[in-house]
Image (cartoon, coloured by chain):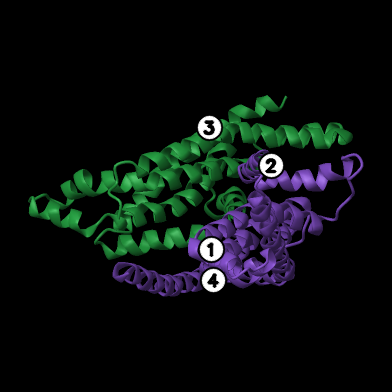
């Protein structure tokens, strides 16, 4: 029965990871832009979403946004995905920004010396090196996002935890088994992500000159 | 329909603020629990017995990579049903245990990184001076291992503060719980939830800035030390 919830959990995870990384790159690059308004605006977004908790944002999107703007954000599935993606996008944008800033100054100078445009410099020289630094943290946040998907059961999505709650309420004495199973389900989903993160750590270490 | 009303805002604010004490209290309680319990993990992992080390590592990994919400439900709903050791816990205690245990695994890692950062010579010196194990830890290792981790520990305080509203799902009457029940009562979620968001922002943002500052200060201090050490090494 719990396995029925797998589809929702996994689909929310994949979609929010996709949008989360997308938001992270957009926001991270915007914060490095020369345009003050763009920089300030994304800075505002990042601080708002990092400063409040995910569960509050989720409820806000679920209850308050329809009241405020009179619009429905599509289905509950989209509300969950948008909340998780915006929240983790904000966190990961800091990693994008930090990694780009951490690429050695000499690289930028070398690219300038080779007469590359600003865009070429970013695309060909800085970005490939920065992405490598981001990988381990991105893997960690993937695990965080998996854990965060459990929150969508609170807005009525039928994920693993939702079915766990149903099972528990139909048979109270089974509660320990049920929740332990739910935890094991999440852990099994997390295992590949844990190994992926370790692999990414190796990749990011490989071929980097020791300082 | 009236979209935003300041009257509701003011009214809801007075209700929600009543939950602030619980939210802050729970944050501190969870944090202290995690700080203490973190040591437990760190030292358990140091026992030089391979299978135990392996088991502890995986238990930590398990706790860390499963959702705190489910762990909270486990402790609140399932623990009373566990044979022999099970007992009924009130929501507040369940939240302390659930979130405290979850974050203690992270805190344990922080301690470990601090202890690993202590120079090998310090361990040798402790042995050379014939310190007892207790003296070695309390007089030499921990005083050097813990201060560099303070900014990281501070970060976890802020992270935990933001996870504490999870406890509203098992009925701890913090600010989110207050806002939700206010919303359910008057069928207006916009103002109450906005107030909760503002309260979180107002409290976590300045503390994040403070931690940042502390981190820079610490970095400078330890960098300086490091630079000193390496220059010493070069001349020797």
Between B1 and A189, the one lying in front of the other is A189
Q: Badge 4: few (under 14), some or many (20 or more) residues near its Cα, within 10 Å?
A: some
Which residue is identified by label 2?
B52
Asked if disc 2 and disc 4 are in contact, CB closer than 8 Å, the reply is no
Label 1 sits on residue: B124
Residue assigned mark 4: B207
Tell me which chain the residue with mark 3 is part of: A
**Quarter of the rendering containing residue B154:** bottom right
| Disc number lying in front (1 or 3) | 1
Q: Are marks 2 and 4 on the same chain?
A: yes
Sequence order check: which comes first, mark 1 or mark 2?
2
> Which chain letter goes with mark 1?
B
How far is disc 1 from disc 4 in space, using C-alphas?
A: 39 Å
At x 33% / y 45%, what residue is drawn? A131
Answer yes or no: is residue B87 visible: yes
Q: Residue at horizontal 62%, vertical 59%? A: B160
């Amino acid at each position: 029965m719990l396995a029925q919830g797998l589809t929702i959990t996994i689909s929310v995870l994949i979609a929010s990871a996709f949008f989360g990384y997308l938001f992270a790159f957009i926001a991270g690059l915007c914060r490095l832009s020369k345009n003050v308004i763009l920089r300030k605006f994304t800075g505002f977004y990042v601080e708002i979403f990092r400063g409040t908790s995910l569960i509050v944002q989720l409820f806000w999107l679920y209850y308050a946004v329809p009241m405020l703007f009179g619009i429905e954000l599509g289905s509950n599935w989209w509300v969950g995905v948008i909340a998780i993606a915006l929240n983790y996008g904000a966190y990961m944008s800091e990693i994008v920004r930090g990694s780009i800033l951490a690429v050695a100054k000499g690289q930028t100078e070398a690219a300038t010396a080779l007469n590359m445009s600003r865009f070429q410099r970013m695309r060909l020289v800085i970005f490939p090196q920065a992405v490598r630094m981001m990988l381990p943290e991105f893997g960690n946040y993937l695990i965080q996002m998996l854990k965060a998907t459990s929150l969508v059961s609170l807005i009525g999505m039928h994920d693993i935890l939702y079915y766990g709650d149903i099972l528990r309420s139909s048979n109270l004495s089974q509660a320990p088994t049920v929740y332990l199973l739910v935890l094991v389900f999440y852990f099994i989903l997390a295992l590949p992500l844990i190994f992926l993160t370790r692999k990414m750590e190796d990749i990011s270490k490989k071929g980097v000159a020791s300082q | 329909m009236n979209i935003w009303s300041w009257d509701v805002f003011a009214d809801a604010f007075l209700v929600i603020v009543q939950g602030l004490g619980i939210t802050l209290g729970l944050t501190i309680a969870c944090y202290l629990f995690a700080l203490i319990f973190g040591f437990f993990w760190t030292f358990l992992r140091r026992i030089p017995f391979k299978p135990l080390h392996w088991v502890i590592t995986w238990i930590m990994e398990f706790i860390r990579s499963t959702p705190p919400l489910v762990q909270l439900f486990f402790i609140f709903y399932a623990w009373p049903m566990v044979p022999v050791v099970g007992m009924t816990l009130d929501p507040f205690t369940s939240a302390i245990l659930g979130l405290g245990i979850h974050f203690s695994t992270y805190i344990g890692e922080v301690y470990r990184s601090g202890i690993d950062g202590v120079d090998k010579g310090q361990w040798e010196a402790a042995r050379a001076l014939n310190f007892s194990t207790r003296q070695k830890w309390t007089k030499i290792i921990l005083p050097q291992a813990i201060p560099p981790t303070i900014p990281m520990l501070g970060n976890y305080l802020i992270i935990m503060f933001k996870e504490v509203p999870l406890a509203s799902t098992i009925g701890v009457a913090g600010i989110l719980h207050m806002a939700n029940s206010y919303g359910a009562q008057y069928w207006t979620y916009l103002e109450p939830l906005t107030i909760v968001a503002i309260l979180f922002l107002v409290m976590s943002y300045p503390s994040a800035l403070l931690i940042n500052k502390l981190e820079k200060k610490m970095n400078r201090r330890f960098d300086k030390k490091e630079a000193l050490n390496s220059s010493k090494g070069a001349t020797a």
